Image (spheres, grey):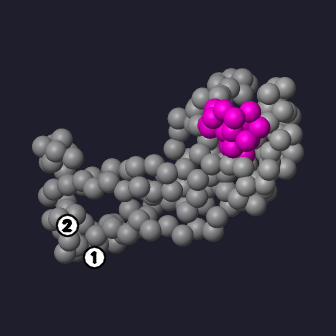
Amino acid sequence: MSDFDKAGYLAKYYLLDASAMGVPQRRQRVFFIAIRKDLAEILPKSKEENFPLLDLTFNEDKIPFATIKTNDGNYRWTAHDQNVWNHRQKGDKAYSCVLQRVENRYSNFNAKFIYDNAVPFTLASCEASKMTLFSEPRRMCVTEMILSQSFPLDYDFGTDNPAKIQYVLGMSIPPIMMAHLASTIYKQWRKIFKNE
């Protein structure tokens, strides 16, 4: 924040969740919003802080996994996955729940279960972060990963390798999330600048 200040900007950070912005994924990210100090003087400020008024409250309907569920057959499945899936119980959130109950060990906590009626967890960049369907014995397929990140299905990832595609997706901000954020800031602040 001090670097923004030194560079001549007022800045504030926000914790936003993609699932409230029309993305079928619970993905929380921190965004820094900054504006040049000379432009910030034109905008009304809140009483609590020296930052222009900006409402970044998003309340889009949640999109459950069933909405994007498909099966392109492009996923990996191992004997370990099958064993965990065979011992799952309703309410298990991750492989670790099963392994702790069945084998008395706590591991594979990044391997999550996806429920059809719930918004999927954050799609991580590492292949070890498996997203396994609770309703059927398979992982999230490539098409479902792309849809959960709100990328267009014809996006060129430069590879057909599911692990590499997952890496790119996991390292990216969902395009719909960015579009909502940019258009909201533009609409709120541009309206004030037009009326001055």
> Magenta span has 131?
no
In this rendered view, identify the residue nearer to me: 2 or 157.
2
- Along the viewing direction, whichever of 117 and 95 lies nearer the viewer: 95
* In the image: residue 23, left or right of residue 193: right
**Residue located at (80% from left, 27% from top):** 80
Q: Nearer the viewer, residue 13 or 151?
A: 13
Q: Judge whether residue 71 can be spotted in this image.
A: no
- What percent of the width, then of the height, locates residue 170? 57, 36
Label 1 sits on what residue type? Answer: Asn
Q: Which residues are magenta?
A: 94-113
The label shown at residue 195 is 1
Q: Quadrant of residue 20?
A: bottom right
Residue at screen point 27% across, 76% down: 195
Dot 1 falls on a residue whose secondary structure is: loop
Discs 2/1, front: 2
**Residue count near mark 2 (Cα–Cα under 10 Å), binned few <14, some 14–19, many ≥20:** few
Q: Quadrant of the C terminus?
A: bottom left
Q: Residue at x 49, y 67 (%)?
A: 58
Can residue 127 be seen in the rendering of this structure? Answer: yes
Q: Is residue 131 above or below residue 167?
A: below
In percent of width and height, residue 16 lies at 45, 57
Q: Which residue is mark 2?
A: 49
Horizontal side of residue 12 vs 165, given as left or right: left
Q: Residue at the spot x=59%, y=45% of the render? A: 122
Looking at numbered disc 2 in the image, what kind of residue is underneath it? Answer: Glu
Label 2 to label 1: alpha-carbon separation = 23 Å
Q: Position of residue 68 (x, y in %)?
A: 76, 52
Q: Circle 2 sits in a helix, a strand or a loop, which is it?
A: loop
